[in-house]
Image (tube, helix red, strand yellow):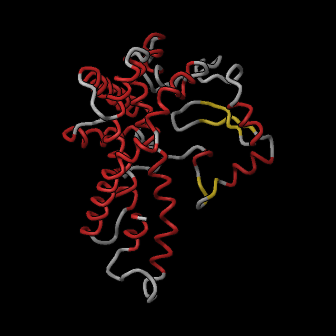
């Protein structure tokens, strides 16, 4: 039996609220040393003013500069300075202005309403396909495994232009890379495999730019972005697009599903033949 990992305090929840310990920290010292899910020691800042100060002062609180005394998790293999620089290229979470500003300006036009609307029909298809599959399977349904996890991953596939033949392996790697019950070393190895695949994807886009985001970046900014930066951007979109979305999706629909389920017998509620999560997820 797999033992559920002990989450760091900032990732724990009391229902829909943060863990009570967070409020205690905020009302107490406001800052405390913790260990992350990636086995790194960091400072957790809990007060709004302090958080704003940290995020707005890259000179003192840099994303690009490794802090003095930084301890790499002992379970991870060593990485040389050049390799580390390549791995951090294109990752906005590991960049400070002006480099961060440069990358953000290139990416922002890729998320216009017009461009996102081109994806809308395909997103609707993906959602409907998974709702249909849940309905065919019948109750009980696992909202996270059957809907909240695969849907965002497949949308990222559409965004990055991942071929259909590669999508099952892509999803499997993504889920394993973000599964905190998987040992750190194994997650790191899966991350390396994911990065290698992203390098292949970038190579295809450079050879024959398509209508996906990587193709557009190559066409419009190919002379300004290095290959490592394109790989880093794709890897960041994978993590940023697939990690928060399942959590938000499941949380947002949980009370909705519970409400609809409890009103099953109401004449004014949904049709009894429609599962409660179907109306909820579709809306």
Task: Report the label total.
Answer: 0
Q: State the residue in front, 78 or 126.
A: 126
Residue at the image point whose x is 25% and y is 41% from the top: 167
Relative image position of residue 148 (x, y in whole percent): 40, 55
Q: Observer-nearest residue: 13 or 265?
A: 265
**What quarter of the picture does the C terminus occupy?**
bottom left
Asked if residue 132 shows in the view, the reply is: yes
Q: Is residue 125 above or below residue 58?
A: below
Q: Residue at x 35, y 32 (%)?
A: 190
Q: Is residue 199 left or right of residue 113?
A: left
Query: Where on the picture, by quarter, is residue 163?
Result: top left
Q: Residue shown at 80%/40% (left/top)?
A: 29
Q: Is residue 31 left or right of residue 96?
A: right
Task: Indicate left or right for 274 with 105 as reference.
Answer: left
Nearer the observer, 112 or 87: 112
Residue 179 in sight here: no
Q: Quadrant of residue 46?
A: top right
Front residue of 88/233: it is 233
- Residue 196: x percent and y percent? 31, 24
Q: Is residue 120 above or below residue 142?
A: above
| Residue 34 location (% of width, % of height) | 64, 36
Position of residue 13 measured from the top left corner of the image (x, y, whole percent): 59, 55
């Amino acid at each position: 039996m797999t033992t559920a990992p002990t989450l760091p305090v900032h990732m724990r929840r009391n229902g829909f609220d943060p863990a009570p310990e967070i409020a205690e920290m905020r009302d107490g010292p406001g800052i405390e040393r913790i260990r992350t899910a990636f086995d790194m020691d960091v400072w957790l800042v809990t007060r709004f003013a302090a958080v704003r100060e940290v995020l707005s002062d890259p000179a003192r609180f840099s994303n690009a500069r490794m802090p003095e005394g930084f301890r790499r998790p002992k379970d991870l293999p060593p990485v040389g300075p050049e390799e580390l620089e390549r791995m951090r290229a294109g990752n906005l979470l590991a960049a400070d202005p002006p480099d961060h500003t440069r990358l953000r300006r290139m990416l922002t036009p890729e998320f216009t309403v017009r461009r996102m609307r081109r994806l809308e029909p395909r997103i609707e298809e993906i959602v409907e396909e998974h709702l249909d599959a849940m309905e065919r399977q019948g109750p009980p349904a696992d909202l996270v495994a059957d809907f909240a996890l695969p849907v965002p991953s497949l949308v990222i596939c559409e965004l990055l232009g991942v071929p259909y033949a590669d999508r099952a392996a892509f999803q499997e790697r993504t889920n394993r890379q973000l599964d905190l019950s998987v040992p750190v070393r194994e997650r790191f190895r899966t991350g390396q495999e994911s990065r290698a695949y992203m390098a292949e994807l970038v190579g295809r886009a450079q050879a024959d730019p398509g209508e996906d985001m990587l193709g557009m970046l190559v066409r419009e900014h190919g002379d300004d972005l290095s290959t490592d930066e394109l790989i880093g951007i794709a890897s960041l979109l994978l993590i940023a697009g697939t990690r928060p979305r399942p959590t938000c999706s499941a949380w947002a629909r949980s009370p909705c599903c519970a409400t609809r389920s409890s009103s099953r017998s109401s004449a004014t509620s949904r049709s009894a033949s429609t599962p409660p999560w179907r109306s909820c997820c579709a809306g």
